[in-house]
Amino acid sequence: MPHKIVLITGVTRGLGRAMVDEFVRRKHTVLGCGRSQKGIEQLRKQIGPPNDFAVVDVAADAEVKEWAGRLLGAYGPPDLVLNNAGVINKNARLWEVPDAEFSQVIDVNLKGMANVIRHFVPEMVKRKQGVIVNFSSGWGRATDAEVAPYCATKWGVEGLTQAFSQELPPGMAAVALNPGIINTEMLQSCFGGAASGYLSAGEWAKTAIPFLLELGPRDNGKSLTAPGG
Ligand SMILES: NC(=O)c1ccc[n+]([C@@H]2O[C@H](COP(=O)([O-])OP(=O)(O)OC[C@H]3O[C@@H](n4cnc5c(N)ncnc54)[C@H](OP(=O)(O)O)[C@@H]3O)[C@@H](O)[C@H]2O)c1
């Protein structure tokens, strides 16, 4: 497998953190972000250059713009973009979800994804190369009670991705990915104790990363589900 530059949002824990380890183990270069200063400092200590980890809130367009400017200058356009950063509302009926929490879920899960696309994809389009993976969910294709804000964003990710895929030149691809059900802090928030019955992020990454590395132009516009999850 040729060396790839892989951009991952949300690397401080969960699926993002596990994907960093698996890509680095396979000798690819990872450019990652998260909001937690502590989480990013730990990553920098554990995994050195040329990998690059930065404190960036994907919901803040100006922060993403600055991050993209620096990384595109240093590394050129990424080969693979994993729009993984996400948040879920605390389990609650829709009418009990405060306005600020609803906005946060939209701002991170949908607008954050658009911010990353806005600032990284133009350079990828110039080269007519690269794959963008937008993290969806089983809750982007079905629903349950008490996670309506999250479902709204993940159904939105599916629509955003399909429309966006129609805008890309031949040679590129955008896909929506349901990673499956994996025992992370996010799953613990919505599933409670039952989360421990599911696969760990590290186990998931072992089968998910080879699958992600194989994605190419023929997959453009697809709604996919990761193996193993
Ligand atoms: N786990 C599952 O079973 C499951 C199922 C379906 C879909 N998914 C999707 O898979 C993705 C990863 O989920 P996960 O389970 O790994 O969640 P997680 O354990 O809660 O981790 C989320 C990651 O996203 C980062 N993040 C959140 N908001 C951010 C922001 N505004 N800017 C930058 N980074 C941000 C978090 O770091 P900071 O807090 O440091 O920012 C953290 O590193 C999400 O899109 C989720 O919706 C997960």
Image (cartoon, helix red, strand yellow):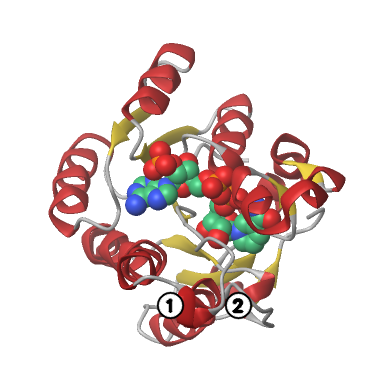
**Label 1 within 8 A of ligand 1 by Cβ:** no
Tell me if residue 124 can be seen: no
Looking at the image, residue 14 lies above or below residue 180: above
Within 10 Å of disc 2 (Cα), the crowding (few <14, some 14-19, many 20+) is many
Q: Would you name the residue on which mark 2 appears? A: 140
Q: Is residue 51 above or below residue 205?
A: above
Q: Quadrant of residue 10?
A: top left
Between circles 1 and 2, the one closer to the viewer is 2
Residue 63 drawn at (x, y percent): 17, 48
Residue at image position (60%, 51%) is: 186
Q: Which mark is residue 27?
A: none
Query: What residue is shown at x 62% (from left), y 52% (from top)?
Result: 189
| Relative to 221, residue 192 above or below | above
Q: Which quarter of the figure is the N terminus placed in?
A: top right
Alpha carbons under labels 1 and 2: distance apart = 26 Å
Is 167 situated left or right of 190 in this image? Answer: left
**Closer to us: 49 or 2:** 49
Note whether ligand 1 is within 8 Å of mark 2: yes
**Label 1 secondary element:** loop
Residue type, mark 1 in image: Pro
Report crowding for label 1: few under 14, some 14 to 19, many 20 or more residues within 10 A (C-alpha).
Answer: few
What residue appears at the point 26 percent right and 63 percent down from the top-left corner?
A: 115
Mark linked to residue 170: 1
Mark 1 vs 2, N-terminal side: 2
* Residue 221 seen: yes
Q: What kind of residue is marked 2?
A: Gly
Q: Position of residue 199 (x, y in %)?
A: 81, 44
Q: Residue at x 70, y 40 (%)?
A: 201
Q: Quadrant of the C terminus?
A: bottom right
